[in-house]
Amino acid sequence: MKKIAIFPGSFDPFTKGHEDIVLRGLKLFDEIIIGIGYNSKKHRHFEIGNMIQHMEATFADYPNISILTYNELTAELAIKHQARYLLRGLRNTTDFEYENSISQVNRHINKDIETVFLITSPQFAAISSSIIREVHKYGGNVADFLPYKL
């Protein structure tokens, strides 16, 4: 049976830290679906269509990585795509507390789902999409944090 993982997030923007988690995840999974979810609590800074294009270009040489958008529960998305794993990155204990709660709810909704956490590589630990959005918003250079050119 194919090991399919979903890497869910708002990816606003998709960073080098996210890219690192996906590429490391390929050592564990046969296929990774990057799911760009619509978060009702967030207003996007980077247009979703452009973000998808950047992400598709980033992973153009990886046929086992796909990108989609969704507006439903992640656990339900996993059922639709026969994914038994959710892939998540952890930068710190704050991330763990947040992700652990989400993991428990996802498991309640879909008893067959397992969340796999990868610890962020040290060189990417300080990168967060929210910080990059702020830097970009005020005209700062964010090129060192993204795996593509804006």
Image (spheres, helix red, strand yellow):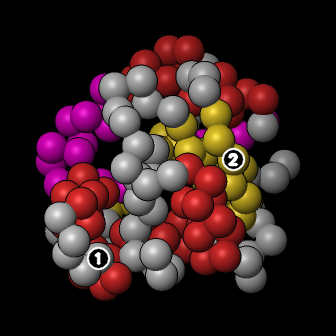
Q: Quick one: label 1, few (<14), some, or many (20+) residues within 10 Å?
A: some
Residue identifier under label 1? 142
What is the count of numbered marks?
A: 2
Whole-percent x and y of residue 69? 65, 41
**Amino acid carrying mark 2 in the image:** Leu
Q: Quick one: label 2, few (<14), some, or many (20+) residues within 10 Å?
A: few
- The CA span between labels 2 and 1 is 24 Å
Residue at the spot 54% in from the left edge and 37% down from the top edge: 37
Vertical order, 77 against 22 (above or below): above
Would you say 55 lies left or right of 63 here? Answer: left
Residue placed farthest to the front in the image? Answer: 139
Viewer-proximal residue among 93 and 72: 72
Residue at the spot 71% in from the left edge and 64% down from the top edge: 65
Quarter of the rendering containing residue 144: bottom left
Q: Decide whether residue 149 is among the magenta residues.
A: no
Viewer-proximal residue among 39 and 77: 39
Whole-percent x and y of residue 124? 27, 74
Helix, strand or loop for disc 2: strand
Would you say 86 lies left or right of 11 here? Answer: right
Vertical order, 114 against 126 (above or below): above
Residue at the spot 54% in from the left edge and 66% down from the top edge: 22
**Amino acid carrying mark 1 in the image:** Val
Residue at the spot 56% in from the left edge and 45% down from the top edge: 36
Quarter of the rendering containing residue 128: bottom left
Magenta span covers which residues? 82-101
Between discs 2 and 1, the one toward the N terminus: 2
Whole-percent x and y of residue 33? 67, 52
Q: Nearer the viewer, mark 2 or mark 1?
A: 1
Q: Is residue 11 visible?
A: yes
Residue identifier under label 2? 68
